Image (cartoon, coloured by chain):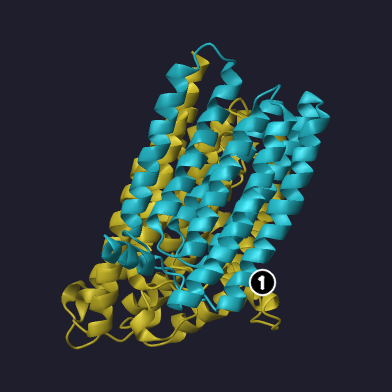
Chain colours: A yellow, B cyan
Amino acid sequence: MLTFALRLIATLLHAALVFALAPLLMGAVNKFRAWALGRRGPPFLQPYFNLYKHLRKTTLVPETATELFALWPVTAFLATATAALLVPSFCTGLLTAPASDFITLIGLFALARAAAMLGGLETGFGFGGAAAGREALFSVFAEAALLVVILGFALLAHSITINGIAVAFAAGHIGISVSLGFALAALLAVALTETGRIPTDNPAGHLELAMVHEALSLEYSGRFLLLLEYAGMLRLLLWMNLIGTIFLPFGMARADDILSWPLGLILWPLKLGVMAALLALFEISTAKMRVFRVPEFLGAAMLLGILAGIFLFVASRIGT
Amino acid sequence: MTYSLAHLMGGILLLSTFLLLSQRRLAAMITLYQLQALTLAAAAFWQGYAQSEINLYLTGIITLALKGLLLPLALREIVHRFNLRRAVETAMPMALAMLLGVGLIGIAVLVVLPSTMSAVSLTREDLAIALSVVLLGLLVMTTRRNALAQIIGFLSTENGLVLAAIGMPGMPFVAEFSVALLVLLAFLVTGIFLLRIREHFDTLDVTGIEDIERRGR
């Protein structure tokens, strides 16, 4: 009973922290990026101000839009929010742990993406349609790469729930293996694409021809735009949580052991901060690639995932 | 611990070779080659420490000075002097080249594992990695039309050989040393060769030579 209560509290804390801190993380990435470029940058809390601004604005619906116009931002947000609840942040063993299946997660990503794409197509204007087409093109490769990477994790951790993988990796029986390096590279490539960062998309870009994620939300305003932007921030935090849980599982608390919480709660923001700084550094040191080179980039990610699988089979044959 | 660090370095080496295959720009290729050489030097030092073998430290120093610093500098100088900042022409689509690369790694793994059943199990996976690096280097040479890119492929092939050599206890130092010298000589020769190609065709694309060959027949 006590265990259950602790897990419930941990889950609620996890949800509260994730939903509260997602804009701050985005603000931190923007700030670090500005610092690395030698600028002062917007304040850390700027994303909160932006969201508040959207809340006060009138929500306009274009004349050409159908009745489903309002459905897509809500669907995209809900799918992303569900996924954010599933991926552990500071501790393992949340109440959502049994549902945190990797395949479920991919399905939720796909649902959010499909909703955003349909939202872009909704009013029938050119940029939204073009962006939806590009998003569809990228997602074919990104999903394939993710599925291949899971194979590697499943072989290593004997589990395909995020929670199970985190527990297995935190136990430290696995050690360093070549395939983990390959899987990390593949996962990073997919994460950059999914969160719409450079090199596949430019989060700061305002050139409609080159935009993907921003162009999908061009027709939305007010509260719908708030939902879409907040979903984008959640997605960034979600991916950082995912990578942090799998590859930096040290110091993660266990939900049923309250004494381990403080360390987990301290280390989690630190890990996020380091990842935000690395992302900012990476973004300023690379250029956005041409749209038609992105499938190549993601194809390489998929091949890296396959290589991870190959080397795992090698390792298992050596072990016997 | 010995094993996992050596293994990690082998993994980085293989990863950088694979990325080398996927790069179009010469500058990026040279940076990746440098990363590869620096990793190799670290691996040599680590193996020297683990096997307490002074020769491996020498290998490490040679690798660091020659391949980690000198050759990348020379390559960058060539790129700068010949003004080769454009994208490199590839002989086949990148996706195909990378698929072939994965196939080659698979072949390396399949060949090395059964044929070394009697060896110590730990060195086998490293041997598979080394063979993969060699094969990928050869693939880089075949998929590029630019002579400089082909040289980089050749150099990375040699890195794979050295990786195999430092992983095996009891490899004579003379062999490694002569390989290193040979590579330096080959690099000088090809450097002069590049100058000659450039004089004759105003480009480093080797298709010009193929044309002459065809006409000669």
Please state if B207 lies on the left or on the right of B68 as rendered: left
Residue A246 drawn at (x, y percent): 54, 41
Residue B139 drawn at (x, y percent): 42, 48
Residue type at numbered disc 1? Phe
Q: Residue at x 67, y 58 (%)?
A: B71
Judged from the image, the secondary structure of the residue bearing numbered disc 1 is: helix
Q: Kindly indicate the quadrant of the structure image that contains residue B135.
A: top left
A213 vs A90: above or below: below
Q: Nearer the viewer, residue A135 or B110?
A: B110
> Mark 1 falls within which chain?
A
Q: Nearer the viewer, residue A315 or B212?
A: B212
A208 vs B90: above or below: below
Please state if B70 lies on the left or on the right of A87 as rendered: right
Q: Which residue is mark 1?
A: A32
Q: Nearer the viewer, residue A288 or B27?
A: B27
Please state if A292 lies on the left or on the right of B121 as rendered: left
Q: Kindly indicate the quadrant of the structure image that contains residue A275.
A: bottom right
Q: Quadrant of the C terminus of chain B?
A: bottom left
> How many numbered dots are placed on residues in this image?
1
Q: Quadrant of the N terminus of chain B?
A: top right
Q: Residues within 10 Å of mark 1 (few under 14, many from 20)?
A: many
Q: Kindly indicate the quadrant of the structure image that contains residue B143.
A: bottom left
Residue B132 drawn at (x, y percent): 48, 38
B49 vs B145: above or below: above
Q: Residue at x 53, y 43 (%)?
A: B14
Residue A99 drawn at (x, y percent): 39, 38
Q: Nearer the viewer, residue A144 or B178?
A: B178
